[in-house]
Amino acid sequence: MTEARKALEKIELELLLEAIFRRYGYDFRHYAQASLKRRVAQSMRQAGVSRVADLIPPILHDKVFFDDFLKFMSVTVTDMFRDPDFFAALRTEVIPVLKTYPFIKIWHAGCATGEEVYSLAVLLKEEGLYERTQIYATDYNNHSLAVAREGIYSLKQMQQYSENYIRAGGRRSFSDYYHAKYGAAKMHESLKDNVTFANHNLATDGVFGEMQVVICRNVLIYFDQQLQDRVLTLLHDSLSPRGFLCLGNKESLKFSAVQHYFEDQVYPQRIFKRVPSRGTHLDR
Ligand SMILES: C[S@@+](CC[C@H](N)C(=O)[O-])C[C@H]1O[C@@H](n2cnc3c(N)ncnc32)[C@H](O)[C@@H]1O
């Protein structure tokens, strides 16, 4: 692609993102460029158009088209007990602290189709903590949230999920937690008793109050530094003093606006503890 064409495409992309923000309030203006461009290109192929600008009219005037476009914008890849070492560390390094609390609130931000939420519910049940925990599971993608609420997954994946569960320190058989029927696995209803699934956009929405744990894994990687700082500040401000923040294994607090307000709890698994005495970045 020539430099002139690249410059034009940059303008078109900025106009597209501005149009989406002003028309629908979804703010993709600070998403990381490489993956954003890939997603827009996919949507262009689907729509059969050759220029980014050609997406603007249907997006502005056709809500169904925009709804489809949103599906392209979300990377919803997830797993049960994704990164089993993370869940193992949660069990051994965080759960013992949570056991000293009378009531626990956990915010699972960017929960996609819910696999991690059910994994967390299983872990909390096995540790005798589920009954006194409230989990808020949020994502900005309503399609993913609908799947999460249903809690029905492909049976084919359960073998892999069972292995993850064992590696994460699971104490029973993973099949104890779902019913298998017609090639699908339906997670037990009781795992949802203390879960509230809700729409929340990390780019535009506000703080959740006084959580003991915030889990936001494999979401920041899609954001640029400015949006990462906004979101990390939001996550920090949603935590109670000494609350735990869990990020994905390619994500870090280094060079972020809140790096001095956390200490490492289990660094390889990206579990951080909010430092109580230093307040929020706004106190500086
Ligand atoms: C790759 S998935 C990660 C899912 C899960 N946390 C995991 O690690 O397996 C990224 C999720 O972030 C969500 N996401 C992206 N931008 C978001 C935003 N601005 N607000 C809330 N969720 C967002 C996507 O919809 C998607 O469900």
Image: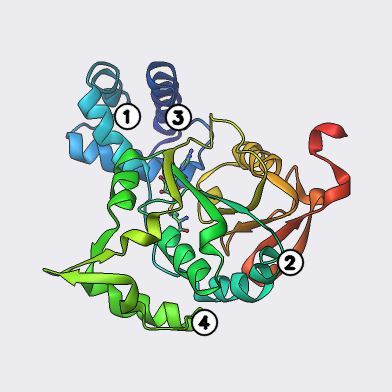
Whether label 4 touches label 2, CB < 8 Å = no
* SS for dot 2: strand
Q: Please say if 209 is above or below 181.
A: above
Q: Residue at x 50, y 70 (%)?
A: 123
Q: Residues within 10 Å of mark 3 (few under 14, many from 20)?
A: some
Identify the disc placed on residue 220: none
Left or right of residue 161, residue 103 in this image: right
Question: How far apart are the alpha carbons under marks 4 and 1?
Answer: 47 Å
N-term-proximal mark, 2 vs 1: 1
N-term-proximal mark, 4 vs 2: 4
* SS for dot 4: loop
What amino acid is at disc 2? Gln
Identify the disc placed on residue 265: 2
What amino acid is at disc 4? Gly
Identify the disc placed on residue 10: 3
Question: How far apart are the alpha carbons under marks 3 and 4?
Answer: 48 Å
Image quadrant holding the C terminus, namely top right
The residue that mark 4 highlights is 169
18 or 220, which lies in front?
220
Question: How far apart are the alpha carbons under marks 2 and 1?
Answer: 44 Å
What amino acid is at disc 1? Val
Q: Residue at x 21, y 27 (%)?
A: 64
N-term-proximal mark, 1 vs 3: 3
The residue that mark 1 highlights is 52
* SS for dot 3: helix
N-term-proximal mark, 3 vs 2: 3
N-term-proximal mark, 4 vs 1: 1
